[in-house]
Amino acid sequence: MARLKKAEIAQYKERLEELRASITHSLNGIAKEVHTPDEATGYSQHQADQGTDDFDRTISLEVTNKEYGLLKQINRALVKIEEDTYGVCDITGEDIPVKRLDAVPYATMTVQAQEKLEKGLI
């Protein structure tokens, strides 16, 4: 398979930067929600309401962790662009198919390498 053209890489870079900006904005909003208690929180609030608030914070933190992971993958892909290795699998050195990059622009591995990594085979 042929390597990506500079124009194609520039398009992926733009998509990655937009994704990064969107996730960063979202993370900032979630962080404010998690760290800022509701103004209505107080002794008069019902115990069940407090449990719901705690549950909501837990869900927000789980979402935040997933978004941080995604942000890390996006940053790695952007580094690969700078290193001129974007579109090449970190594990095997094979080209990552364009269809995969179109679907997952922050992919740094082929599907096969990703599956092996997730199964603990690599």
Image (spheres, rainbow, N blue to C red):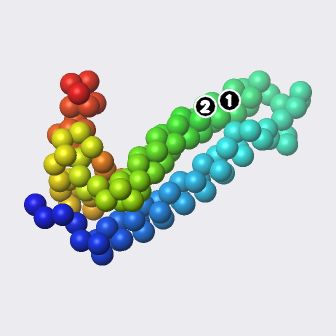
Label 2, secondary structure: give it: helix
Q: Which residue lies furthest to the front in this view?
A: 83
Q: Can residue 65 be seen in this view?
A: yes
Cα distance in 3D space between marks 2 and 1: 6 Å
Q: Name the residue under label 1.
A: 54
Whole-percent x, y for residue 108 in the image: 30, 48
Q: How far from the left and from the top, in percent, is residue 92?
A: 18, 41
Left or right of 21 on screen, residue 108: left
- Classed neighbour count for the residue bearing mark 2: other residues with Cα under 10 Å, few (<14), some (14–19), many (≥20): few
Q: Please tell me whether residue 104 is drawn above or below residue 69 in the rendered image.
A: below
Q: In this view, which residue lies farthest toward the right?
A: 43
Which quadrant of the rendered structure holds the C terminus? top left
User: Would you say the residues marked 2 and 1 are in contact, meaning their CB atoms lie under 8 Å apart?
Assistant: yes
Location of residue 6 by image quarter: bottom left
Q: Mark 2 points at which residue?
A: 58
Helix, strand or loop at mark 1: helix
Q: Is residue 62 left or right of residue 42?
A: left
102 shown above or below 36: below
Which numbered marker is on residue 29? none
Give percent across and percent down for residue 33.
71, 44
Q: How crowded is mark 1: few (under 14 residues within 10 Å), some or many (20 or more)?
A: few
Residue at (17, 53) in percent of width and height: 95
Specify the amino acid type for callout 1.
Asp
Residue 103, image x, y percentages: 28, 58
